[in-house]
Amino acid sequence: MTITQLQYLIAVDNHRHFARAAEACFVTQPTLSMQIQKLEDELGILLFDRSKHPVRPTAIGERIITQARTVVNETNRIHQILQEGKNLMEGPFKIGVIPTVASSLIPLFVRSFHEKFPKIQLHIEELHTDEILEKLRMDELDAGLLATPLKERGIIEKPLYYEPFMAFIPENHRLSKEAFITNSELDIDDILLLNEGHCFRNSVLNICNKLGAPGTKAVEMESGNFETLIKLSKQGFGMTLIPYLVAVDLPEVDQKYVRPIADPRPSREISIVYTRSELKIKVIDELVKVILANIPEKLLLEENNVISPVSMRA
């Protein structure tokens, strides 16, 4: 049994397809299949049910794959310890970021991090929360930046900052003359939303505390980005809610439409998350320091009303 065989085993489990697993491991499919077969012969068991499409681990295969992940992680940790002992900060670091955080946060810190650690290759991928958690568990990411609390088993959450929600109120809207907005004035029938899959959408629904009746809006628009929602809002199709960092990054001409929400101000907790194996923990710690040094200080203070990104509705 070799580490390489265990890596191939994990790759097949991740991709549930021998050809895609081989491509991910940069080997030919016959080479990967032969090594998996040799491992099965050595153990005297079948690790995968090849009659299923996609292929699935057998019951005993699942247990062995779980242990294989531990073994490979610990092997990687040995290399990481050696690097840290030599005070080396280099190599790839893969991080997943939810879309509602990526566009406003990444430009604030990525240049500073690169200048401080030029030998670390940051691989940043925009993913939804569930995708980040899955890739963390499969060791396809080193860390994630997303809205918490999630309280997922085996996942460590380290809060970074607390980002208030801001209201974007267009001209001639019923609230356009208000200096600030209260929670009681928010009406879900009047709010343009991000589409399904965005945790910010769930948080907005949790604030409004009710669902609107279908077909009551002039335009039923759910978008994957704030820019579209803001443009539609300015055309008179309703208001929208946006995170603080998105609001402060708007062009000056749009700043006049932004209103704060009164206390207890709704906000979201943004955390860096990683698995309990804590690989590359030194890089994670340094990344945290750089992020905190490059965001507005007001975001470092915990707000009174952190809204869960998990929808309270079934």
Image (tube, rainbow, N blue to C red):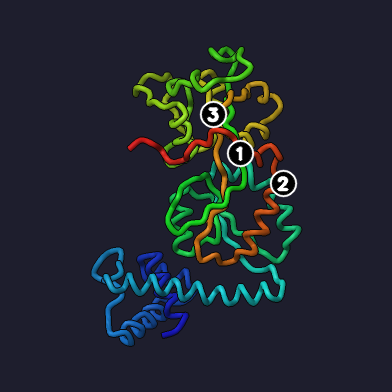
Q: CA distance from mark 1 to mark 3?
A: 20 Å
Q: Name the residue that disc number 2 marks.
A: 294
Q: CA distance from mark 2 to mark 3?
A: 24 Å
Quadrant where the C terminus lies?
A: top left
Count neighbours of disc 2 (C-alpha within 10 A) and say few if under 14, some if 14 to 19, many if 20 or more. some
- Which of the 4 quarters of the picture holds residue 216? top left
**Element at badge 3?**
strand
Count neighbours of disc 3 (C-alpha within 10 A) and say few if under 14, some if 14 to 19, many if 20 or more. many
Above or below, comparing residue 111 to residue 28 in the picture? above
Could you tell which of marks 2 and 3 lies nearer the N-terminus?
Answer: 3
Q: Which residue is rendered at x = 61% and y = 66% of the image?
A: 92
Q: CA distance from mark 1 to mark 2?
A: 17 Å
Q: Is residue 188 left or right of residue 179?
A: left
Which of 236/58 is in front? Answer: 58
Q: Name the residue that disc number 3 marks.
A: 241
Count neighbours of disc 1 (C-alpha within 10 A) and say few if under 14, some if 14 to 19, many if 20 or more. some
* Residue 144 % position (x, y): 54, 54
Instruction: Indicate which disc residue 302 carries.
Output: 1
Which amino acid type is marked by label 2?
Asn
Which amino acid type is marked by label 1?
Glu
Q: Nearer the viewer, mark 1 or mark 3?
A: 1
